[in-house]
Image: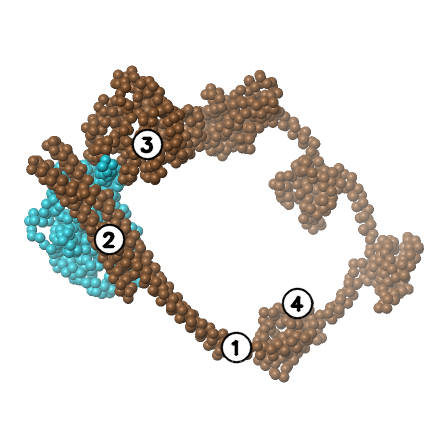
Chain colours: A brown, B cyan
Amino acid sequence: MNGSRRVMLVLAALVLLAGWYFRERLQMERHLGAFAELLFQVRGEEMALDREMERVVAFRISNYDELVKLRSKLQQALQALKNLGGRLQENAALFQALMNYGSALERKRRLLDEAVSHAAIVRNSLLYLPVLIRAVGKSSPESVPSLQAMLDELLTIQLFPERAGENGETLKAKIDAMRDQAGKVAGQTLRHLQNGLAQSNLLHSLAEQYRSVDSGDRFQVLRRLFLDHRQRQGRNSIFLGFGLLALVAVLLTWLWRALIRLQRMRDLAERARQRLADAVESIPEGVALFDNRDRLVLFNRTFAQMYPWLEKKLKPGAAFTELESEIRSHVHRTDLQGKSLPSLDRKALRQVSCIERLREGAWYLASNCHTSEGGTVWVRTDITRLREAEGELRKLGRALEQSPVSVVITDVNGIIEYVNPKFEEVSGYAAEELIGRRPSLLKSGEMPDEAYAKMWRTILSGGVWEGTFHNRRKDGSLYWESARIAPVRNENGEITHFIGVKEDITELRRYQESLRMSATVFNATTEGIVLTDAEGRVRMVNPAFTQITGYAPEEALGKSAVDFYGDDNPEISAKIVEELARHGSWAGEVASRRKDGSWYHQWLSVTTLHDEGGVSNGQVIIISDITQHKTDQARILYQANYDLLTGLPNRALLADRLRHALHAARRNRTLTAVAFLDLDRFKTVNDLYGHGTGDRLLEQVADRLQAVVRESDTVARFGGDEFVIVLEELSTGDQAAVVAAKMIRAIARPFDLGSRELVVGASVGLTLYPNDVPLEMEVEEAATLLLSNADMAMYQAKARGRNQFQFFEPRTQAEIRLSLALEQDLRRALENDELVLYYQPIVEMPENRIVSVEALLRWNHPRRGMVPPDQFIPLAEETGLIYEIGNWVIVTACKEVRRWHEKGLRVGLSVNVSARQRERGFSVKKLRALLEESGFDPAYLTLEITENLMMLESEEVIACLRGMKELGVGLSVDDFGTGYSSLSYLKQFPLDILKIDRAFVRDLPDDEEDVSLVRAIMAMADSLGIRVVAEGVEAEAQREFLMTLGCELMQGYRFDPPLPAEEVLRKYGPSFPNLEKGASPAPVAE
Amino acid sequence: MRKGLFVEHLLVAVALLGVLAAGGRAGATEPLAPLAPPPIQPAGLVELGRALFHDLRLSGDGTVNCAHCHPLARGGVDGLPVSLGVKARRGVANAPTVYNLAGQIAYFWDGRAATLEDLVLEGPLQNPNEMDTNWEEVLAKLGRDAALERRFRELFPRDGLTARNVARAIAAFLRSLVTLDSPFDRWLRGDRTALDERQIEGYRLFRSYGCVACHQGANVGGNLFAVVGVMADFFSERNRPESPVDQGRFNVTGNEADRHVFKVPSLRLVTFTAPYFHDGSVKTLDEAVVIMGRYQLGREIPAQERRDIVAFLRSLAGRHPLLEATR
């Protein structure tokens, strides 16, 4: 006991030690982890702050809210970091590094605050200066250009601080020089310029200071020290871990030895106990031994097997009383004489003998005795076999007495020694009248004596005789008895008695007669008959059943009857079973399959049989084969409703189906479409190849049509080469359009008519219910109307050309705008020449001379008319069609403009190219091929790229653009100014033209900000020799203003809208006086 | 050479676009933004902060609460050049409004408090001219109020009633004081009828004069520091001697560059908060616009344009239930 307590103590100590160690470690890890996380968060935010600083200096921030958020986030994170750092004070170097880094950040923050103040002032000047310069313009316009130039210089200084010193001096000198002659307003402008210059210098010096803050180095120092610290902490903790491990090892060794000692003592005790147990085990009786404290010491397996329910409790140490009460609750105790025992007290239980009867039927002799120790020993002997033999005998006696058959026992001489009560009942004689007599007393004289003699011979020779007696009762009546008589032998094998067992079979013989007659009917009838048991399993079938169903009796027996007679449709079969359960019988027509799978129709009658108690005990099923009758009926029906050639529903059935469909549509609020399909060249086929070929064509058309519609839809032959298709349960008209298109495609494929292949087409007219009929129109009338609508629409389709479909009413077209249709249309648009190019002239000032045109794509949709590009270009980009469309545009436009050149109108051509086109494979090689195909001089072609293409800014894009440039084409940037974030990358691109976006032109000349912007772009482009095209010029005022800014090229409604090719030629062609023949070629690129 | 020039000029265009982004085109951000609703905070905390804001026990002699100098129904200001604290002692700077403090760069004219909690912890409470007490005293007084103590326990199960938690509660309340749905915000969000023509003209002037360079963001200011007197010396032309409070942020940083530097105030409730500037020396808004034009922009703004600008400034004031309590 003491030993195990010590073991527990040591274990507890181990657990505590390990717990403490891991807790310490975890805490340290968490603290250091949090510190690291914060450290890098702070660093990240610091870098974000650096970026913001650069944006502040570049005036890229007009709203400081986000900056303030970032600033306070950094401040909070830094504070949190310092708080955590407080716990690192033991590492003085690390703590100092943290403080150093913190103060660097503080300094950065302070410099940023200051920079923001100064940037605001400079911004103020920059915002206000254009207003001032405009004001100057009113009083002394002559000084405006030089002021404007100074403003530009100020901006340049702001953006290129590295040259600020030298440029600043020049600007300052200019300001000073001008100050003397300046008026009041101009003086103010100069003051602002000067102030802006001063502040800008200050700002740059602040930015310089900011950049020179050595927070990066300090961070690196801090980071290195922190990592060292962390590593050291890790090492310390590993040392501690090793110490702990050693301690654990020592304690485990001690634990091991203590356990071995304990084990050895236990082995000794166990061996002694084992010997005793072996002895007890070998006794056949069940034994259980209790010590003087009434605790179970040992027991043998027999005991355990005798009381299986004790299994759980039967363990050494179990209490006497507990086991006793468990046993008592399962057994009935009697004394040795069989009298019931009252429950015994504890004392009596120690010394008692009794009989125990278990519920399971076993009998035990139980005897409990004292032992010398003062305990008790229980001994149990199984006496079940003994008791059973006893019971068996008693049972036999009772069986004879109560037997339902007559029993008679005679001695070897045939003298009756015993008859049972049944014998008395059947014969009418009492036992007393029979005992001592012979059974021949019952002879009726109806049986020949020879029969009796044979019986005696058989039984005397030791055999068993079986036969029938025709006997006479005491009252004189005759009866039939079947009997078995057998000798009874003693243990030596000598016959001592005969026993006769007899049964009155008078009634049975009568039954057998009537059964024989039923069986004849059962076998001879032509109706199939099945008998089942209560569960519906086949018990018997007649030959007619086999004949009808093809199942032999042995195949049917024992199976579920409904499998043979049930309908092929399991739902109907289920219904029959249900009806049967409810009413007890069912009769009706059913379609089933024979064993070979062939169909047959039967008239089925099922009746449930009941026994006297009204409980169902089986069914009689009668099957009459009515297949022939049904087939005849169906053929008549089919001929009335179906077209014999194609097998499709004819007009009569179509009318019926259409009515049903319309009813359903009205009920379910769905759409129904009626399509009228007419073959386009059927008459020709008939005339050229004869009716036989025509018929085969119609058959194939029918097959193809059925293949494209759903099974629930109806395809009917309306007559001749006309088909009507009813499409049910649609939700939109588009679905009908899709099916119509499918049908047309299906018919358009060549038909293989044996010797020849034929191509015909189809036209389809579509109409929708309820959309195309008046509200509240009766279904009957609506059906007629729909057919005529569809017919009419079919003619319209035909009029528009072959292989077309047409909706009855134009207003339903609105529903077909869905992209599915649009996409299909777009794929077709290229083949069908639906895409059209318009050309918008780009004119040169001042004489509005055309120098170039921009090719603009339009889609002349067959049903929708002109579709604007913003509706289909995204779709084309999405589906990849943009590649082919783009190529088509280049070739077509080039060919067109080349034609103009030949006619003397020598103008340039601009074509838009998008990033998607390039992704899809538009390359330098491709461009060269397209140019060759169209025979166009590349010098006249300018590709307009969008800023999004430039934004990709990959080497690949740049190389590609340079390659194109080498072909001789020009490059221009479209919508310049709308994507300014990428402007700094512009230098990468070999550009010739900038097109100022219409958004900046729109508010000219009133919006002073736009004025400033356009002026800046112009100044820049001018200095480079890059030409500028102003897009979207709509008003004369805009034109004039742009001219004063020096913009020479313009495009917009002020001059021309996008024009069809012929219109351009007509307006600007050689006959137009404005055009000088042989004027310098127009390419706007250099 | 040519290429270098090309790049240079492109960059000039970039800069111009950046500067002029005030025009609000091509996806650039507006310099002014609508005020966002206050963050969702525990309701009990805001309520507690509101009670403490009105609690007289936060002053030494029990006569002054926060609302004394910042009456909420009157725009969060008392309308005096400098406020009167306990025993009618005079403060040194004009009391700013307590509305729309969230998102500001720092607090007090000189920005000496970094957070709203700091503002409460080290602010008017200890100032002998304002509330004239200390935390020990205040916590002792509040601690005697069992109900209040319980509310603190509920909201701060860990430490209950402490100076920091009092500051948290009041700061939470201050964060809830956002004046939403001003006519100008509605206009920014697309309601073109929210401003009349004069106000729109005022906004245009506000931008083109460059006011917007400093007064920007959702609070129309409050998110940067700026020197007073850019184009001319405000303090020497003012008819009163310079006092320590005029040194502004210099008092906090000791940095010479920060002399006369102040936090740019938010203009959201500027029509409520006369008199103006840190010294409360200017009585009317019109006059304030004149001075701003003269000293910050170097420009005498004509009277008609001032009226338009003031009309625009009026459209900045949004609504708050406490602000409208007596309106």
Residue A1018 x, y percent position in the rendering: 22, 32
| Cβ atoms under marks 1 and 3 closer than 8 Å | no
Identify the amino acid type marked 3. Lys
* Residue bearing the label numbered 1: A262
Of residues A771 and A6, which is closer to you in this image?
A: A6
Identify the amino acid type marked 2. Leu
Q: Residues under labels 4 and 3: Cα distance?
A: 108 Å
Q: Chain of mark 1?
A: A
* Residue bearing the label numbered 2: B174
Closer to the camera: disc 1 or disc 2?
A: 1
Q: Residues under labels 1 and 3: Cα distance?
A: 97 Å
Q: Secondary structure at mark 2?
A: helix
Identify the amino acid type marked 4. Arg
Closer to the camera: disc 1 or disc 3?
A: 3
Q: Quadrant of the C terminus of chain A?
A: top left
* Residue bearing the label numbered 4: A359
Residues packed near mark 2 inside 10 Å, few (<14), some (14 to 19) or many (20 plus): many
Identify the amino acid type marked 1. Leu
Identity of the residue drawn at 37% across and 24% down:
A935
The earlier-in-sequence mark between 4 and 1 is 1
Residue A992 x, y percent position in the rendering: 28, 31
> Where residue A965 is drawn, which disc sits there?
3
Q: Residues under labels 4 and 2: Cα distance?
A: 85 Å
Q: Quadrant of residue A853?
A: top left
